[in-house]
Amino acid sequence: MTNSVNRADAIVHAAHVLSSGGLVAFPTETVYGLGADAENVGAVERIFAVKGRPPSHPLIVHIGASEQVEDWAAGVLEPARFLAERFWPGPLTLVLRRSARVPLVVTGGLETVALRVPDHPVALALLQAFGGAVAAPSANRFGSVSPTSARHVREELGRHLRTAVDVVLDGGSGNVGVESTIVDCTGEHVAILRPGGVTREDLERALGYSVPIRSLGSIRAPGQYASHYAPRARVILVEPDELAGEARRLQALGSRVGALTPRAFERAVADGHVVHILLVPESMTEYAQQLYELLREFDRRGCDVIVAALPPEQGLGLAIADRLRRAAGP
Ligand code: AMP
Ligand code: MG
């Protein structure tokens, strides 16, 4: 979109497409979403078809303002109200009891719904113009790397673009870059189901108590699949000081090796004659913003294996490490 007039037109058109049961890919501050009218069962079913996503895998429902939470959730408890007030719009998704207005196809058959107000001008304008709620997973094929630009969306869903995805809104790259933090707010004690853009430390500071990270039992979430967020290349995780040796070993076996390398180990890795070195950004904020583009760049360069080390698991490092582990999953 070249200017704000075009952008306003595009958003009005996209809202109309949603109202007519179409699919719209749109930017958020985390990753690009593939959205449908959350109340239109046929449209939501098309999301699952386009993504190749199992129907038991629930979608996040996006709303334009926290005041709308009562329309889509029932029996909202105090911690959820507080977190919505404090972190919305933002990269925090609250799992709540669903209201009758949310079809079961959206929640994968669960009695809970995941709600979020995204912090991106295009997403908010779209939600406002549309007026309802937009069910949207990330706009990629199931299991692969989430898109952080309109170009990534086109690469991912290329063959569906004319047939199923009616609009791709381009809003540049979001300033968070990894998915939202998902917090179970169905009980008195909140728990993190997926680490993301709002850090555990942010949540604990706001709430004043410690927040556990729960791998899900009864509640299902896409993030819990062992393999997810994965590039085509195989991802191998090692300690930072093992990067050079592991890269050299794989190279000797005939692999086309990429190394996601902290600057401090660049020399060592380069001495091993690894061809494809991409540097880990200096700050965790930049690392989160660029993580998925870095993984895609190794794929573009034709690497068949990527060696990487986990960052310290504090702040955004927790979400980055989670995504790298799943990218390396079986
Ligand atoms: P994705 O489609 O991969 O971008 O992510 C959608 C996210 O929504 C998943 O990570 C799920 O964890 C989450 N989600 C949606 N609905 C629920 C729910 N009712 N309970 C728990 N997680 C949910
Ligand atoms: Mg996803």
Image (cartoon, grey):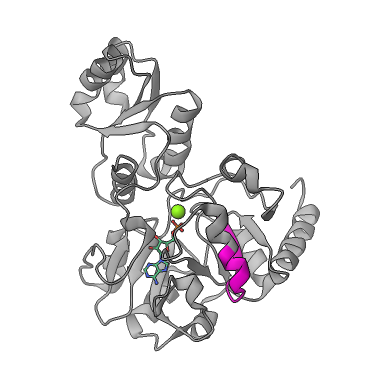
Q: As displayed, is residue 164 above or below residue 237?
A: below
| Residue 220 in the figure: left or right of residue 31 | left
x, y percent for residue 27: 59, 54
Among the 4 quarters of the image, the one containing residue 200: bottom left
Q: Nearer the viewer, residue 138 or 319?
A: 138
The region drawn magenta spans 33-45
Total marks in image: 0
Residue 145 visible in the current orientation: yes
**Horizontally, is 329 left or right of 147 in the view?**
left
- 26 in relation to 262, above or below: below
> Which residue is nearer to you in this view: 210 or 16?
16
Residue 293 percent coordinates (x, y): 48, 37
* Residue 155 drawn in magenta: no
Rendered location of residue 92, percent (x, y) = 41, 65
Q: Residue at x 76, y 57 (%)?
A: 10
**285 vs 89: above or below:** above
Identified at 32% across, 80% down, the residue is: 186
Residue at 37 percent of width and 48 percent of height? 228
Which image quadrant for residue 14?
A: bottom right
Q: Position of residue 117 (x, y in %)?
A: 51, 68
